[in-house]
Structures are given as structure tokens and as C-alpha cells.
Image: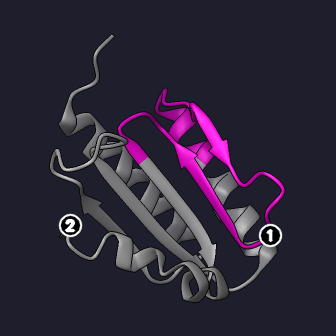
């Protein structure tokens, strides 16, 4: 089954709303506009602690599962400061401020169009 870019956009927005519900801030969605071979959209969510990181990851997973979308791959399972959830055309980054400062995550997506 092929998933349309519009469906991936809806997945990205639902993931962002789930992060917002768990007080992630800021929450940003970027349209990668065919410039990336990895995904069509990226969702960036900053959290304040490891427990909040886990709560945001769980909320995203639960909400998207209810919509019939399942995470294909997770990176950072044992990390307490940055996790990436891969939903095919959507990459969801959940990270603590210190990970943002160290890896400059938002700078990686600075040239892409915000949604």
C-alpha cells in the first residue's frame, strides 16, 4: 500500500499534537519537500526531562496506533535525551534541550519549510 504525501502530512500533524498535549515545547513540523530521501516530513519536539521524553514518545505512539499508523523503526531506545520515531514518510524527533544544543537538531532542518 502506498501512502500519499498528504497522509504523511496528517501523521506529522497528529504526532505534533500528541507532543503538544504532553507539553513538549517548541513543537515544529517541517515539509522536507522531496529534498530528503529519508522522509517527507520531520517533527521536532523539545522536552524538559527524560520522563517527559518517554511520555511524549508513548503519546505519539498511542495516538498514531489509534489511527492505524505504526512506528517502523525507533532510534535511541536507551537514550534519555533524544529519540527518533520513523513512520515511513515522517521522522519524529523528541529530545531534551541539551541534545538540541549539542547536536543542533533544529539547524539540520533550518532550510526546510515549516508547516
Quarter of the view holding residue 26: bottom left
> Left or right of 70: which side holds 53?
right
Q: Which residue is mark 2?
A: 112
Q: Is residue 62 magenta?
A: yes
Q: Position of residue 63 (x, y in %)?
A: 55, 45
Q: Which region of the structure is painted magenta?
A: 61-90
> Left or right of 2: which side holds 85?
right
Q: Position of residue 111 (x, y in %)?
A: 20, 72
Q: Position of residue 58 (x, y in %)?
A: 69, 52
Which one is nearer the viewer's eye here, 77 or 18? 77
Quadrant occupied by the C terminus: bottom left
Is 83 located above or below residue 71 in the figure? Answer: below
Q: What secondary structure is found at the residue carrying circle 2?
A: loop
Give the residue displayed 72% in from the left and 73% down from the top.
81
Q: Residue furthest top?
A: 1
Give the residue displayed 53% in from the left and 66% down from the top.
19
Number of the label disc, if any, that sits on residue 80: 1
Amino acid at each position: 500500500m502506498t501512502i500519499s504525501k498528504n497522509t504523511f502530512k496528517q501523521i506529522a500533524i497528529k504526532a505534533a499534537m500528541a507532543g503538544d498535549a504532553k507539553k513538549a515545547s517548541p513543537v515544529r513540523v517541517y515539509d522536507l519537500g522531496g529534498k530528503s530521501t529519508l522522509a517527507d516530513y520531520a517533527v521536532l519536539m523539545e522536552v524538559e526531562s527524560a520522563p517527559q521524553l518517554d511520555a511524549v514518545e508513548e503519546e505519539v505512539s498511542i495516538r498514531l496506533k489509534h489511527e492505524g499508523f505504526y512506528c517502523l523503526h525507533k532510534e535511541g531506545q536507551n537514550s534519555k535525551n533524544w529519540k527518533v520515531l520513523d513512520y515511513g514518510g515522517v521522522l519524529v524527533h523528541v529530545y531534551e534541550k541539551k541534545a538540541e544544543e549539542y547536536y543542533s537538531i533544529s539547524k539540520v532542518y533550518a532550510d526546510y519549510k515549516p508547516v
